Amino acid sequence: MSKELEESRELNLDFKKLKKIAQCQADVIPAVAQCADTGEVLIVGYVNALALETAVREKMATFWSTSRNELWIKGKTSGDYLEIADILVNCEQNSIVYKVHLKGMGSCHTKNAAGDARYGCYYRRIVEKDGGLALEFLPGAE
């Protein structure tokens, strides 16, 4: 990801993401990592069978990186692990929720101006501005 996209106040949603995933032909479902204590959504990613099996075995939120086409145990590089408390599945069995406890400084790979890992990946909100849509940082996230 680019720093410009991650730090921008300009709204630039990737409406083609699911099409890109379909083109790579990865057998994945969406996976949400949610803080078990606060209910805050931290990350949305994708899992395949290997990622889910690894998550259950390791007790760490694990995803399938659709951009790198590889297994991604969240925190393996950064040290900011998401320890699994529970794994939920929806009624249609086409998405899961990892209920997690943050084991580190944050769960997002981006950092704020102080250089600290952001708590979650949802650090901006969409607002109406000058007749269009823009982004605004949540308090303390900039």
Image (tube, rainbow, N blue to C red):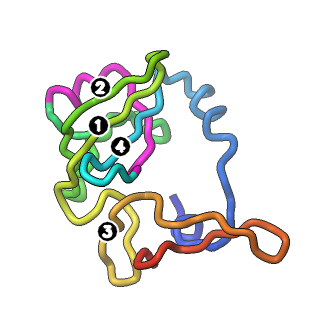
Q: Are marks 2 and 1 in contact (CB under 8 Å)?
A: yes
Marks 4 and 3, the one that precedes in the sequence: 4
**Residue 128: % across, % down:** 74, 69
Q: CA distance from mark 2 to mark 1?
A: 7 Å
Residue neighbourhood size for the residue with mark 3, other residues' Cα within 10 Å, grouped as few (<14), some (14–19), many (≥20): many
Specify start and end residues of the magenta stretch as a single range: 41-57
Tell me the CA gap for discs 1 and 3: 19 Å
Label number found at residue 52: 2
- Eyeballing the image, is 139 above or below 20? below
Q: Amino acid at mark 4?
A: Ala
Which circle's residue, 2 or 1, is located before the other in the chain?
Answer: 2
Q: Which image quadrant is residue 50 in?
A: top left
Dot label at residue 33: 4
The residue to which callout 3 is attached is 117
Please provide percent x and percent y for residue 11. Answer: 68, 63
Q: CA distance from mark 3 to mark 2?
A: 25 Å
**Closer to us: mark 4 or mark 3?**
4
Residue 113's place in the image compared with 34, above or below, is below
Answer with mark 4 or mark 1, whichever residue precedes in sequence. Answer: 4
Residue plotted at (47% across, 32% down): 30
Q: Which element carries disc 2, helix, strand or loop?
A: helix
Residue found 34% across the figure and 45% down from its top? 34
